[in-house]
Image: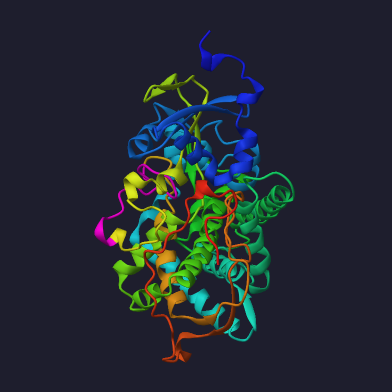
């Protein structure tokens, strides 16, 4: 009997080690295996092939090798993606459903989302200035929630924006953990699916008009297969798969503020509004800071990669965090250096914070362009904003998935850009400051 098909020895399963190690678990295993681009292990009793590197990205996103149907665990579907979501489909069904999301790849629509979020940001800043202190992570979530709802044509009273933002954040925050965070995520998804399913039914019945050309109109009217419409519940799931990841840019906004605090010399570079500088900074935030630790699928057949095998139905993991911190790709991966993307453009299968492959045909997030555009614009506005950073816990724990600065990045004395003075002390150039390698510490990759 093939060794990979034998019943697992209980001590060989790495599930508990993953829960303990968080982001550092798979890169550490890769290091322990001699730095090879593949290894085999077991998780939840199943054989696992883990792969890393640009060639592995192409291997992973080839549907002849790896498929998603049945690959996403039930708890993740019940929190992050939703049951019946595009992420769970393969082949023709995936391509038909993905037709809903392909317009997000267009520059005009990306610009539309950014415009609405920026307007909401400016409204938010005016309100923050009247408060002694604000938590950027929380406030960015409200700004993003308001902006993306306006763009999508989804009604959202101002008084409800905070509660909806908290639910959208909870879905992301609780997908990879047991306990209270997970159950908050489940309850949040149920509330928001019910809200949006009612809206879809009202649009279809004519009780609520949908703006022509809006995302709401598109999802409510979408047909696939033999011409059948999505059920209201599935339509709600797919609406959330635009709203939720847009609001998840809150993580990147907090990371951007963290980077600007650590490396204040970057502020002047961003304040100038040079699009190339903004893009390079946004890419580096997405590369450097932890978000997705890895992506998973199921082996479509018996697979072999660099001498490591997994049987059909076994798990295949793509090491996202490890690849984004691979010294062979990035030179000095624990230095925060936006200029690396001015020196060398971001290659599709090298930089994979939101997956790899072709977003038009594969499983790479079609909203990645939206996330990038939002982060570019918000980083420039953040660099131009005047505020103080009071004493707080800015550590970023690697055991927590998804992680973020512990206190969410607290700001005090916020002043709108037009009130700037010439007394800024942002003159220190620290762009080569290094973070300690993630696998050298069990607790943090960044400190105040």
Question: Taking the image as drawn, is residue 323 in sight?
Answer: yes
Magenta stretch, residue numbers: 342-360
Q: Which residue in the rendered view is the most extreme toward the left?
A: 343
Q: Quadrant of residue 91?
A: top left
The residue drawn where x is 30% and y is 49% is 347
Q: Can you give x and y, in whole percent of width and height, for residue 59 in the image?
A: 37, 32
The residue drawn where x is 35% and y is 53% is 332
Is residue 359 part of the magenta span, yes or no?
yes
Q: Is residue 235 placed above or below 131 in the rendered structure?
A: above
The foreground one among 219 and 79 is 79
Q: Is residue 246 placed above or below 96 in the rendered structure?
A: below
Question: Taking the image as drawn, is residue 349 in sight?
Answer: no
Q: Quadrant of residue 35?
A: top left
Horizontal placement of 161 versus 123: left or right? Answer: right
Is residue 368 part of the magenta span, yes or no?
no
The residue drawn where x is 46% and y is 24% is 300
The foreground one among 71 and 438 is 438
The number of discs equals 0
Q: Is residue 5 placed above or below 76 in the rendered structure?
A: above
Horizontal placement of 390 versus 58: left or right? Answer: right
Q: Main secondary structure of the magenta part?
A: loop
Quadrant of the rendering where the C terminus is positioned = bottom right
The colour scheme is: rainbow
């Amino acid at each position: 009997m093939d060794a990979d098909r034998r019943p697992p020895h209980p001590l060989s399963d790495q599930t508990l080690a993953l829960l303990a190690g968080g982001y550092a678990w798979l890169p550490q295993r890769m290091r322990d295996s001699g730095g090879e681009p593949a290894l085999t292990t077991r998780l939840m009793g199943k054989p696992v092939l883990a792969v890393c590197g640009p060639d592995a990205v192409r291997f992973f996103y080839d549907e002849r090798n790896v498929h998603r149907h049945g690959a996403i665990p039930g708890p993740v579907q019940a929190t992050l993606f939703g049951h019946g979501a595009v992420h769970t489909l393969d082949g023709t069904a995936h391509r038909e459903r993905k037709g809903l999301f392909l317009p997000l790849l267009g520059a005009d629509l990306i610009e539309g989302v950014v415009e609405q979020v920026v307007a909401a940001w400016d409204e938010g800043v005016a309100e923050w200035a009247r408060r002694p202190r604000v938590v950027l992570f929380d406030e960015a979530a409200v700004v993003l929630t308001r902006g993306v709802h306006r763009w999508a044509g989804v009604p959202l009273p101002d008084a409800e924006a905070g509660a909806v933002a908290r639910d959208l954040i909870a879905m992301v925050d609780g997908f990879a953990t047991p306990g209270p965070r997970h159950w908050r995520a489940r309850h949040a998804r149920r509330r928001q699916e019910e809200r949006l399913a009612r809206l879809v039914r009202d649009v279809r019945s004519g009780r609520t008009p949908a703006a022509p050309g809006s995302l709401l109109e598109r999802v409510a009217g979408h047909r696939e297969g033999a011409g059948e419409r999505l059920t209201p519940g599935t339509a709600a799931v797919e609406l959330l798969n635009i709203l939720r990841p847009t609001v998840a840019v809150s993580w990147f906004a907090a990371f951007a503020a963290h980077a600007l605090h650590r490396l204040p010399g970057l502020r002047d570079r961003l304040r100038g509004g040079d699009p190339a500088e903004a893009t390079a900074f946004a890419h580096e935030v997405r590369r450097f800071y932890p978000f997705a630790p890895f992506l998973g699928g199921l082996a479509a057949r018996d697979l072999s990669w660099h001498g490591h095998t997994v049987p059909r139905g076994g798990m295949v993991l793509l090491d996202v965090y490890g690849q984004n911190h691979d010294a062979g790709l990035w030179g000095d991966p624990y230095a925060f250096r936006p200029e690396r993307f001015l020196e060398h453009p971001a290659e599709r299968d090298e930089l994979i914070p939101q997956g790899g492959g072709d977003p038009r045909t594969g499983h790479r997030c079609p909203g990645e362009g939206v996330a990038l555009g939002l982060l570019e614009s918000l980083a420039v506005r953040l660099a131009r904003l005047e505020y103080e950073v009071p004493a707080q816990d800015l550590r970023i724990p690697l055991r927590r998935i998804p992680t973020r600065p512990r206190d969410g990045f607290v700001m005090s004395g916020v002043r709108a850009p037009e009130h700037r003075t010439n007394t800024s002390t942002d003159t220190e150039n620290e762009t080569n400051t290094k973070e300690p390698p993630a696998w050298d510490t069990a607790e943090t990759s960044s400190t105040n």
